[in-house]
Amino acid sequence: MEEFKNKLKEDRYEQNTKERNKLATLVKVIVSLWLLFAATMFILYGVGCLKFPSEVMCTLLATTTANVLGLGYILLKGIFPENKNK
């Protein structure tokens, strides 16, 4: 019976690790695409191809920063949870 419980724990740990890896990859792709989009917008704005008010560009910069920092924080909290036995 104990061997069965240990096998279940190992299987759950392995599945959990796979899911975390999938999530990490997904977040990396999303953040990379968002940064590429934002960089393209800033370049086009800088060379004069796009005519937006400066407030729009400030908002784009703020949301990009929040997305990168927020998703990174969430991802790291999921991979490295706090130890509750401190």
Image (cartoon, helix red, strand yellow):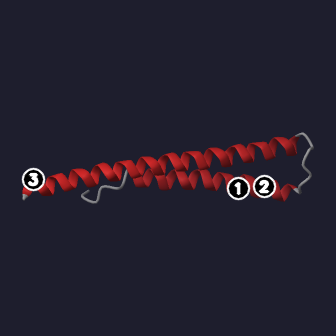
Left or right: residue 79 compared with residue 50: left
Q: Mark 2 against mark 3, which lies toward the viewer? A: 3
**Alpha-carbon neighbours of circle 2 within 10 Å: few (<14), some, or many (≥20)?**
few
Q: Residue under circle 3?
A: 3
Q: Which residue is drawn at 82% across and 41% down?
A: 43
**Image location (x, y in percent) of residue 64:** 68, 52
Query: Which of the pair 27/43 is nearer the observer?
Result: 27
Q: Residue at x 67, y 49 (%)?
A: 34
Above or below 52: residue 48: above
**Residue contact at pointers 2 and 3, CB within 8 angstroms:** no
> CA–CA distance between discs 2 and 3?
58 Å
SS at badge 1: helix
Q: Residue under circle 2?
A: 58
**Alpha-carbon neighbours of circle 3 within 10 Å: few (<14), some, or many (≥20)?**
few
Q: Which residue is drawn at 28% across and 60% down?
A: 84
Q: Residue under circle 1?
A: 62
**Image location (x, y in percent) of residue 37:** 73, 47
**Alpha-carbon neighbours of circle 1 within 10 Å: few (<14), some, or many (≥20)?**
few
